[in-house]
Image (cartoon, grey):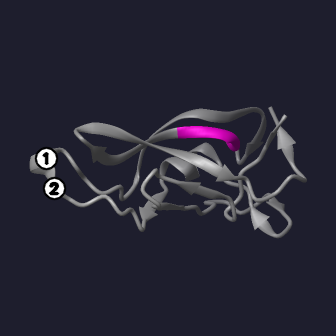
């Protein structure tokens, strides 16, 4: 079982950028924090990325989630949309040496609600 992500979970790009999570419905909470769905995760913005914007050398600062490639619950939905799990990962809109940049979960921030 994996921990379910909430708006208080910590997700980052490799350059200290933090994903700003929100919940479109807020209808399910854990410890007062709204559960994040896969749709919410795909809409996350990123702030604080330290990569310089230098496209001529293949670098672009991470500013938003470009793709979510893993981490959808198969057993828990919120408003019909799969909840996001602490196994979630994906790509940002940033570039490092011309290659896409991956974001990842640092901590779910809670252990009370789990799902598969």
Give residue 88's position: percent from left, percent from top.
Answer: 62, 39
Q: Give the spatial CA distance, label 1 vs label 2.
A: 6 Å
Q: Which residue is mark 2?
A: 54
Look at 42% across and 67% down and name the residue there.
47
- Name the mark on residue 21: none
Say above or below: 102 vs 47: above
Say above or below: 71 vs 79: above
Look at 90% across and 53% down and name the residue there.
112
Q: Which residues are magenta?
A: 83-89
Q: Nearer the viewer, residue 90 or 13?
A: 13
Q: Secondary structure at mark 2?
A: loop
Look at 52% across and 55% down and name the residue there.
12
Badge 1: residue crowd in 10 Å (few <14, some 14–19, many ≥20): few
Query: Would residue 81 be visible to someone looking at this image?
Result: no
Q: Which residue is mark 1?
A: 57
Q: Quadrant of the N terminus?
A: top right
């Amino acid at each position: 079982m994996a921990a379910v992500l909430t708006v208080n979970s910590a997700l980052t790009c490799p350059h200290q950028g933090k994903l700003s999570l929100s919940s479109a419905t807020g209808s399910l909470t854990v410890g007062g924090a709204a559960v994040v769905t896969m749709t919410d995760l795909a809409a996350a913005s990123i702030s604080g990325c330290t990569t310089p914007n230098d496209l001529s050398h293949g670098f672009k600062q991470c500013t938003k989630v470009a793709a979510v490639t893993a981490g959808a619950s198969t057993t828990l939905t919120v408003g019909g949309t799969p909840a996001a799990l602490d196994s979630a990962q994906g790509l940002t809109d940033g570039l490092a040496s011309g290659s896409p940049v991956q974001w990842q979960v640092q901590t779910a921030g809670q252990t009370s609600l789990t799902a598969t």
